[in-house]
Amino acid sequence: MKQLLSSRWYLGLFFWIISFSWSLSMNAATLSPAELTIEQASTQLKTRMQDPAFTKDFGQITEFVKSVIYPKVDFDKVSSLVLGKHWKTASEDEKKRFKQEFQLLIIRSYSRAFTEFKEWSVKFLPLETTDNPDKVVVKTEIIQPGLQPIAISYKMAQNKGEWKAYDITIEGVSLVTNYRSSFNADIERSGSLTSVIEDLAKRNKEALTAKDQTEKSPS
């Protein structure tokens, strides 16, 4: 699979996570329920960001993502949107395996991005509503010293009283659409979804093994 290696996309993945955790521009009393979902974990992240050991420990980052981020992202919906037409013909085992490996891919990208971006703040823009009261678009700008603001929007849906994100758009480009294009090309080239899942699993395993060896090596 061709990974999204540009700094903009690593930055986007990073802020997809951190924007669930910290808003500096609005307080809880002025946020909508969907925006509150993005704001809720602020204290946890702020504390983590102040701990240099955290940003260097992949295990801690993984556990943070699992405990704080997974409940706020609809990975079933994200995975189905990323695979598109291939999700409909995939077996239940393929769907389960793809979702698992895709989550690991996001974690790996997040882990790298976490160590690269230090100074930032999040500004909430007016909420974009839709005809469906259970769907909204949360618009934000990422502010970094000396740089132009980066526009990042989150598509969110409410299910059983909980708001969860299912896509992120960075400067007008959808993360789901980008990944779908990449995976579709891989599936067409390899001839099967199973082959693509196995390749992704191999890449994840190699990356995690390399990361673990790096952390265990003497300084």
Image (cartoon, helix red, strand yellow):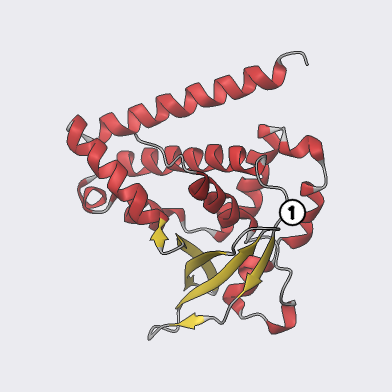
Could you tell me residue 198's position as x and y percent? Answer: 34, 28
Mark yes or no: residue 92 visible. Answer: no
Left or right of 43 in this view: 17: left
Left or right of 205 in this view: 25: right
Could you tell me residue 96's position as x and y percent? Answer: 38, 42
Q: Quadrant of residue 130?
A: bottom left
Left or right of 113 in this view: 217: right
Front-most of residues 75 and 115:
115
Q: Quadrant of the C terminus?
A: top right
Q: Residue at x 44, y 84 (%)?
A: 133
Front-most of residues 98 and 137:
137
Q: Residue at x 63, y 61 (%)?
A: 20
Specify few, some or many for label 1: CA neighbours under 10 Å numbering under 14, 14-19, or 20 or more. some
Q: Residue at x 26, y 53 (%)?
A: 84
Q: Which residue is mark 1?
A: 45
Q: Secondary structure at mark 1?
A: helix
Q: Residue at x 26, y 36 (%)?
A: 186
Could you tell me residue 110's position as x and y percent? Answer: 57, 43
Mark yes or no: residue 74 visible. Answer: yes
Front-most of residues 142 and 45:
142
Left or right of 29 in this view: 196: left
Q: Quadrant of the N terminus?
A: top left
Q: Quadrant of residue 131?
A: bottom left
Does residue 169 sit above or below 180 in this rendering? below
Q: Amino acid at mark 1?
A: Leu
Does residue 158 sit above or below 51 in this rendering? below
Does residue 114 sit above or below 123 in this rendering? above
Q: How many marks?
A: 1
Q: Residue furthest top?
A: 218
